[in-house]
Amino acid sequence: MGATPLADNVLTDRLLRSWLRCRRKAWLDRHGDANQRRWTAHRNLLLDDQQRSFVALLPHKPGHGMAACAAGEEGVVGLRFKGEGPSGEPVEAHPPLLLRVAGQSRWGPFAYQPVLARQGRRITREHQLPLALMGHLLEAYQVGPVPELLVLGGGGRRLERERIRLTSGLRKQLSEALRKLNADLERPQPPALAADRRKCTLCSWRESCSRVASADGHLSEVSGIGAKRREMLQELGVHGLNDLASANPERLAVEMERFGEQHGDVARGLVAQAVAQRDGLVERLDSTFALPELQGAPGVLLYDIESDPDARHDFLHGFLRLPRQSDGRWDLAAATYHPLLVMAEHGEQRSWLRLQRLLSRYDGWPILHYGETETLSLRRLAQRQGASDAQLRRLKRRLVDVHARIRSHWRLPLSSYGLKSVAAWRGFRWSQAGVDGARALLWWRQWLGEGPKRRGSRHGLAWIFRYNQDDCRATWAVAEWLLKEDDLLKTGPDTDQPTAGP
């Protein structure tokens, strides 16, 4: 049952899952230019979670192919089912695992159910409907019912099992989804861009769609606009970035209050943000210093965490120590990187003691980070380890969120105020192309390994350290710009007025 080229009209479980995530993605998966597709770590992480879950579920290696089903193997992989969907359309599914269960089938007094591993905290339609398609086809192959479908969670670290009944209602949802998927795939042009493009970060077509969004002035390109706010603006006749930039902010604020007072409050800022992006303007919002904590500080610690969110494990606390010279200048050439790996077997207390030693060694140095992750993680860790109220207050004073200071003091001509966007705008370049937190997590899992032969290539660990250090340096690139602009408050021209970006 090896892989064969698909006919243009065959609907597969993978296409269905893509469509449930984004209608445009499914169309591009079938018709898009493969040269515009970019590799992402997301699918590899999904496969890694799947493998860990299956190993935790089955004590023995699963069998392969139809012969394994006939032999009654507990688990079976390597099957590809073809047949007709609920409405007679040609369909195909590749269940990642079949698990033997009680029942009756063509092979004897047992049956099989399809198994899927999930990421995230809950089951969604992206899990339910592809599984339903697998169950529908499996019934024909085993000549017996598939009353339940199985979803595994936790990536094997804390295996969770959730069963889904293959009810008439779920079959009806599958039939309707396949009908709509087929209609979208037959379109000569791809469906519209997703309403909320924040979900596009994991997609292999992200760059292609971003170019379209930028060229079209898609409302999602305006920082601060998600799917719901975009719908509100469109209802008011605002359909793109240029429409928003040309809107009367006071009138728009009144009109948006019909959706709630909070939306009226942000309307003026959204118009100003659209103007900044359209015209490339940089505008100071607050005439106070953005980073007063650094005035006279002997040095700073630049801090960035790498995490495995599914395991709820911060596996790396990275610090870049940046001292100040006697003449007051920051000595980036003397910066030193301190990576603190957190191994689960070492225990949290040991990690906290190591962090305390490093932080106390540079007492009085502000700790700069980008976003709230580092603050929340470090303070929660301190609380769990019994830090006093005084220690927590001192830690809170030292932690400085550069992202929050950017948002409160400046309006930038950028669609995102994330670290990658703002640092790149300042000219910073990461030393490893195309690397992000997801790829760092993949490297971590590959290095960590499984069983007695743990630990993969040390190269993977070196790549993680390099990426983490680059994030620290990128944080400094943004902070350094803020400091230079703060200096202009003392001696320079009036910077309250919008100016052209770099």
Image (cartoon, rainbow, N blue to C red):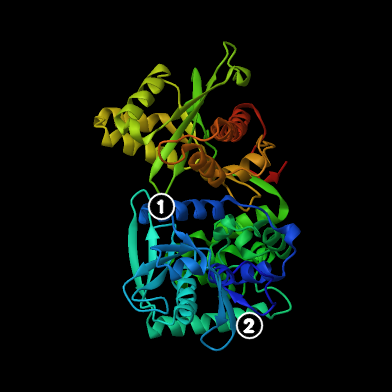
Is residue 292 in view from this perspective?
Answer: yes
Q: x, y (%) of residue 437?
A: 54, 44
Does 45 sit above or below residue 146?
above
Q: x, y (%) of residue 400?
A: 46, 34
Q: Which mark is residue 211?
A: none
Looking at the rendered image, the disc whose residue lies closer to the viewer, 1 or 2, is 1
Outermost residue on the top side: it is 326
Does 282 sit above or below residue 278?
above
**Residue depicted at 31% across the width and 32% down the height:** 347
* Residue identified by numbered label 1: 55
337 on left or right of 158 = right
When asked about the image quadrant of residue 22, the answer is: bottom right
When asked about the image quadrant of residue 325, the answer is: top right
- Image quarter where the N terminus lies is bottom right
Does 77 sit above or below residue 493?
below
Q: How far, Cα to Cα, is label 1 from label 2? A: 39 Å
N-terminal of the two: label 1 or label 2? 1
**Residue depicted at 66% across the width and 63% down the height:** 241
* Residue identified by numbered label 2: 183
- Decide: few, some or many residues near mark 1? Use Cα within 10 Å; few <14, some 14-19, many ≥20: some
Identify the element where label 1 is drawn: helix
Q: x, y (%) of residue 478?
A: 60, 35
Is residue 122 in view from this perspective?
Answer: no
